[in-house]
Image: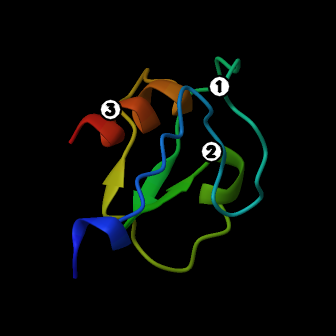
């Protein structure tokens, strides 16, 4: 693969749940988790049938959790 075939997408500051697509960019809602590269909001986390790979910290907002994942 050459460099000309690589696409880089800058998602900026937007934070969306990968299940319900709700925006959490301006939300202070706490919780959420991730399974692989999927970010799952606190609302959808309760619907999971499998254990998440990572979870938000005790008082961490979903937005800040997603920002932390992006830095990894």
Would you name the residue on which mark 3 appears?
Answer: 68
Q: Are marks 1 and 2 in contact (CB under 8 Å)?
A: yes
For mark 1, what is the residue? 29
* On screen, residue 20 above or below 59: below
Q: Dot 3, how many residues are within 10 Å of its Cα: few (below 14), some (14-19), or many (20+)?
A: few
Task: Give the SS element for disc 3.
Answer: helix
Residue at x-position 36% and y-position 73%: 5
Where in the figure is residue 65, as x and y percent of width and height? Answer: 42, 33
Query: Depth check: 2 or 55 in front?
Result: 2
x, y percent for residue 53: 31, 64
In the picture provided, is 64 more to the left or to the right than 2? right
Residue density around tag 1, few if under 14, some if 14–19, many if 20 or more, within 10 Å: some
Q: Nearer the viewer, residue 23 or 9?
A: 9
Q: Nearer the viewer, residue 3 or 30?
A: 3
Separation (CA) of disc 1 from disc 2: 8 Å
Q: Which residue is mark 2?
A: 42
Q: Earlier in the sequence, mark 3 or mark 1?
A: 1
Q: Is 28 displayed left or right of 6 in the figure?
A: right
- In the rendered structure, which disc, 2 or 3, sits on the residue that comes first in sequence? 2
The quarter of the picture where residue 71 lies is top left
Q: CA distance from mark 2 to mark 3?
A: 16 Å
Q: Position of residue 11 (x, y in %)?
A: 53, 40
What separation in Å lies between label 3 and label 1 (alpha carbons)?
Answer: 15 Å
């Amino acid at each position: 693969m050459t460099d000309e075939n690589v696409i880089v997408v800058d998602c900026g500051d937007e934070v969306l749940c990968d299940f319900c697509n709700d925006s959490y960019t301006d939300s202070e809602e706490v919780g959420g988790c991730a399974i692989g590269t999927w970010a799952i909001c606190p609302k959808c986390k309760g619907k999971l049938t499998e254990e998440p790979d990572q979870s938000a910290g005790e008082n961490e907002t979903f937005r800040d959790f997603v920002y932390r994942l992006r830095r990894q």
